[in-house]
Every structure is written in C-alpha cells, then in structure tokens.
Amino acid sequence: MTKARVIGIQIQPEIGDKKANLDKVQKLIEKNAWFKPDLIVLPEVFTSGVDHKFLHKLAENIPNGETTEFFSKIAKKYETNIVAGSFIEKCEGEEYKNTSLVFDRQGEIIGKYQKIHMFNYYGSNESDYVSSGDKAVVVQTDIGKIGLSICYDLRFPELYRALTYVGAEIITCVAAWPYPRLDHWLTLNKARAVENTAYIVAVNQCGRVNPKRQNVGISMLVNPWGDVVASAGGDEGVFLGEIDFDYLRKIREEFPVLNDRNLEAYKIL
C-alpha cells in the first residue's frame, strides 16, 4: 500500500455518559464513511470524559467490555483499522489502566497499549486513579507499523524514538489536552514527526470540561517533514487525511537522520 486514508474523530465527550459518547462516534463515522478510511483514530478517555469520579465507574474489562464490542463491530462493518483512543481498563484485583486498543479490518484486537507516563501536574493526579503501563507498543497492520502513545507521553521523546527504532512509520497520540498549553500541543506533535521522520496522527478531545478546563481540539495529521496536512480545528468534528508512504520513504532516504546517530557517544547516559 502506498497511501492510507485516515479519519481523526474529535469529540467533546458528555461527561460520564458512555452511551452518548459512543453514539456521537458512530454518527461521525457513518457521516464520513464515504471517505473509505484505512484507519480511524479516537481521543483519550472519550467514553467518560475527563472527570475522575467516572473513570472507575465506567471502567471495562478487555476484551469483554461494551467499548471493545462496539469497535469490533465498527471495524468489521467499515473494513477499517481502528485505534480506539483510550478508555479505562479494569484489570485484575483493584488495578486500573488507561488503555488504547487497535482493531484490524476483521474486528480483531491486534494491539493493546497501557499509558506509561502518568500526568500529575496541577492537581490532575492521574496516578491516584490508574497505574502506569510498562511496555512500549508497535502494532503491525495492513497499512504499516503503528506506534501507540497517549497524551502526556508526547513530552517523552525517548518513547517515540524507541517506537521508530522498531519500525514505526505512523505514531498515534490520543489525548485530552487542555488550554493553556495549546502551543505545546502544536510544537510537540510537529517535533515528534520531524525528529522521527514519521507520520503523527494526533487526536484530541475538544470543548469545555468544567469552569477550569477546556480541551483544545486541533486534532491533526503531521507528515514526516513537520507539515500539518489535515486538522479538525477547535470544534467537534473530524479531520480527513492521507498518509503517503512513498513520501515517508523519500524523506527517510534523502534526509537519513535516523542513520546518523552516534550511539557510542551517548554512553554517558
């Protein structure tokens, strides 16, 4: 495959209302099915919204939960790969994870990533509600290798470089990223694309969560040269974009930064 069509689904979640949020997603996918996507990507914790009191209440087992079943059917119906944003996974005992699933075109789970870096800045205290994952994940799909990340992970370039080392051509960042850090969102997504000569598919929540928090939206597809080739803007909706693998290979061949590392010089680390 030389090109792949991507839909980023950007929603303002109804806080604590899983059914309403899955309905929103279904309607946006149905409305844009004409695009015949090869990949659909959702935001972080979109089934619950960013409200800590609902994270455990709406948590699900995998693979036996409502959200897993929903996306399995969607992937099969539209014959598309899906990175199902993230939602809270109920694990064994009393442990919870912020988990992202990948589905293939047959509706099968082919990848699972549990968010590594917990966001505890300014009263967010994510680690009070979920525990961190301990494994970076790259998934082989029929459109190429996809590396997975969630929101705060974006601030850790070593994760993205590790994903690239094992072959990631596309890296998804699913997020619930708020103001006033819009410039960071724009800059870091472009930086991760440029430094890894990879496509970044960054899909964010939008809209006001409470009087103190509003998510910025601006979901985007960034190419390996750092150009934003598709964006959803600030409102609820989608972006429609195209990944060009010939372009990716051209950039990596003509500007081989990944081959010019000097690992011996890094031993001090």
Image (cartoon, rainbow, N blue to C red):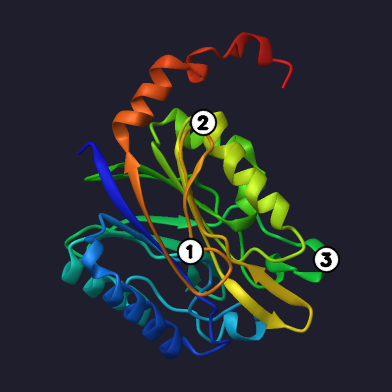
Q: What amino acid type should be assigned to the residue bearing mark 3?
A: Tyr
Question: Residue at left 65%, top 73%?
Answer: 129
Q: Please identify the residue farthest to the right as the structure is shown.
A: 122
The local secondary structure at tag 1 comes to strand
Give the class, few, some or many, for how many residues have Cα within 10 Å of label 1's Cα (few <14, many ≥20): many
Quick one: label 1 or label 3, which is nearer the N terminus?
A: 1
Residue bearing the label numbered 3 = 122
Quick one: label 2 or label 1, which is nearer the N terminus?
A: 1
Residue 95 position in % (x across, y down): 56, 71
Question: Residue at left 23%, top 36%?
Answer: 2
Q: What amino acid type should be assigned to the residue bearing mark 2?
A: Asn
Q: What amino acid type should be assigned to the residue bearing mark 1?
A: Thr
- Where 47 sits versus 109, above or below? below
Location of residue 145 (image quadrant): top left
The residues tagged by marks 3 and 2 sit, at their Cα atoms, a distance apart of 30 Å
- Where 137 sits versus 174, above or below? above
Quick one: label 3 or label 2, which is nearer the N terminus?
A: 3
In which quadrant of the rendered image does the N terminus lie? top left
The residues tagged by marks 2 and 1 sit, at their Cα atoms, a distance apart of 24 Å
Question: Residue at left 51%, top 75%?
Answer: 236
Task: Name the residue nearer the viewer: 115 or 245.
Answer: 245
Q: Disc number at residue 99? A: 1
State which mark lies toward you, 3 or 2.
Answer: 2
Q: Disc number at residue 196? A: 2
- Asked if the residues shown at circle 2 and circle 1 are in contact, with their CB atoms under 8 angstroms apart, the answer is no
In which quadrant of the rendered image does the C terminus lie? top right
State which mark lies toward you, 1 or 3.
Answer: 3
